[in-house]
């Protein structure tokens, strides 16, 4: 499994596990956090590829960021992204989803 670090908002692949471990101990990995009513929306840098893919895929783009909703109508709803910019945009969409209210009103 490949490991990744952030420098600013840019993702870099680690050459060694030791490099990653040292970075991970002190790294700020939060992209954004918001509370909307009973829901908490959290978007973080995962630092590992969660895009469980087949090893024969030649041009796989790693999924390195995740937005998750805790509590409320959308609890445990989760999305993953390739880049910081995608994660920021996804976080805002999740916040808007929580503001809409009941899951019965969700539009996909």
Image (cartoon, rainbow, N blue to C red):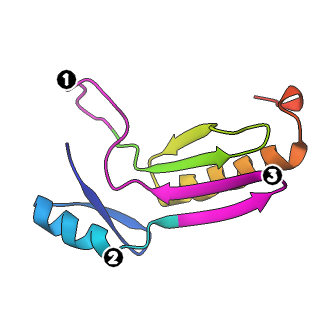
x, y percent for residue 37: 85, 55
Which of the two residues, 30 or 84, is positioned nearer the viewer here?
Answer: 30
Mark 1: few, some, or many residues within 10 Å (few <14, many ≥20)? few
- Cβ atoms under marks 1 and 3 closer than 8 Å: no
Q: Would you say residue 107 sits in the magenta stretch?
A: no
Give coordinates of residue 96: x percent, y percent: 80, 50
Residue occupying the point 55% across, 52% down: 86
- State the SS at label 3: loop
- Tell which of 16 and 21 is nearer to you: 21
Closer to us: 80 or 71: 71
Residue 36 included in the magenta stretch of the image = yes
Q: Which residue is mark 2?
A: 26
- Snapshot quadrant of residue 97: top right
- Judge left or right: residue 70 versus residue 11: right
Residue at image position (51%, 48%) is 66
Vertical side of 80 occupied by 19: above or below:
below
Mark 3 closeness class: few <14, some 14–19, many ≥20 residues within 10 Å: few
- The residue at which mark 1 appears reads as 56
* Distance from Cα at disc 3 to Cα at disc 2: 30 Å
Magenta segment, which residues?
A: 31-60
Name the residue that disc number 3 marks: 38
Residue positioned 21% across, 64% down in the render = 20
Instruction: Judge from the rendering whether residue 38 lies leftward or rightward of residue 53; answer left or right.
Output: right
77 w.r.t. 84: above or below: above
Q: Which marked residue is nearer to the observer: mark 3 or mark 2?
A: 3
Q: Is residue 62 visible?
A: yes
Q: In the shown orientation, is residue 25 left or right of residue 9? A: left
Mark 1 → mark 3, Cα distance in angstroms: 43 Å
Dividing the image into 4 quarters, which one contains the C terminus? Answer: top right
Is any atom of residue 15 visible in this view?
no
């Amino acid at each position: 499994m490949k490991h990744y670090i952030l420098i600013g908002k840019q993702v870099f692949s680690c050459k060694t596990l030791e490099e990653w471990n040292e970075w991970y101990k002190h790294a700020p990995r939060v992209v954004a956090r918001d509370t909307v009513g009973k829901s908490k929306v959290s978007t973080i840098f995962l630092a590992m590829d969660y895009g469980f893919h087949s090893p024969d895929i030649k041009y796989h783009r790693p999924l390195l960021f995740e937005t998750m909703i805790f509590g409320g109508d959308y609890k445990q709803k989760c999305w993953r992204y390739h880049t910081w910019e995608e994660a920021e945009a996804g976080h805002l969409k999740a916040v808007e989803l929580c503001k809409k209210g009941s899951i019965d009103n969700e539009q996909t």
